[in-house]
Amino acid sequence: ELKVEQNPLFLSMQEGKNYTIYCNYSTTSDRLYWYRQDPGKSLESLFVLLSNGAVKQEGRLMASLDTKARLSTLHITAAVHDLSATYFCAPTGIIFGKGTRLHILP
Amino acid sequence: KAGVTQTPRYLIKTRGQQVTLSCSPISGHRSVSWYQQTPGQGLQFLFEYFSETQRNKGNFPGRFSGRQFSNSRSEMNVSTLELGDSALYLCASYPMTGQGTQYFGPGTRLLVL
């Protein structure tokens, strides 16, 4: 059974700082998805990583995938308040991590 | 292209009742999956349908069931509601099973009293 572990589960950080969210998973998967959820809203796709070593960037967010280590990271550069949300990873696409609630302080 | 729609958006039921939730996928998408989201358990997979066939099922009791119609619209049913079934139920659609980004609907918020 696939297990997905995200950490941290909660992160409060200052604007302008950098930080990384980690997503570890227990069984082989050749793809991984990152989603964002704003409070009271549904999930929105951020990145699809389809191979080992894949790296995708959109604005201040960059995601990477290491299928051998069963690890994906979501790196936030120079955080801004608008990035406050909960971020989910989903190896295979249907099993999700518990989410990382990101709160960026102005 | 219209997004995923879910009806109703909000629902209040009492214990023991049953409920049916509906999901209309994005036009052309043949796969639909359902999730239950609660503060304690997070986002949990319920089931996945492709071309009217259930392809995957999560670890939920038999009170939770679903189906998909020939037009790809899907319904999920929960019988004999329990207080713990209070949750946000999300539906997502995608073109083919097991592939590609899922596009999520706005969800149905169910409150069981």
Image (cartoon, rainbow, N blue to C red):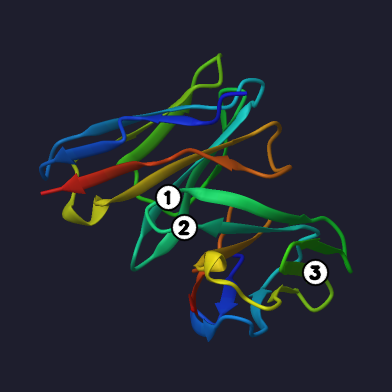
Q: Chain of mark 1?
A: A
Q: Is residue B88 left or right of residue A100?
A: left
Q: What's the residue at 25%, 44% (across, down)?
A: B110
Residue A47, position as x, y percentages in the image = 72, 56
Residue hosting label 2: A38
Of mark 1 and mark 3, the one earlier in the sequence is 1
Tell me the mark number nearer the camera, choosing from 3 and 2.
2
Amino acid at dot 2 = Asp
Amino acid at dot 1 = Lys
Task: Name the residue nearer the viewer: B100 or B44.
Answer: B100
Q: Is the residue A92 above or below the residue A3 in the image?
A: above
Residue A50, position as x, y percentages in the image = 83, 55
Per the image, label 3 sits on a secondary structure element best described as strand
Q: What's the residue at 62%, 43% (across, down)?
A: B102
Residue A66 lies in what quarter of the image?
bottom right
Q: Are marks 3 and 2 on the same chain?
A: yes
Q: Chain of mark 3?
A: A
**CB atoms of marks 2 and 1 within 8 Å:** yes
Amino acid at dot 3 = Leu
Residue A83, position as x, y percentages in the image = 56, 66
Task: Name the residue nearer the viewer: B64 or B20.
Answer: B20
Give the quarter of the figure containing the N terminus of chain A. bottom right
Residue hosting label 1: A41
Separation of marks 2 and 1 at Cα, in angstroms: 5 Å
Residue hosting label 3: A65
The crowding category of the residue bearing disc 1, from other C-alpha atoms within 10 Å (few below 14, some 14 to 19, many at least 20), is few
Q: Is the residue B7 above or below the residue A61 in the image?
A: above
Q: Chain of mark 2?
A: A
Whether residue A97 can be seen here: no
Q: What's the residue at 57%, 80% (across, down)?
A: A15
Q: Is residue B54 left or right of residue B89?
A: right
Of mark 3 and mark 2, the one earlier in the sequence is 2
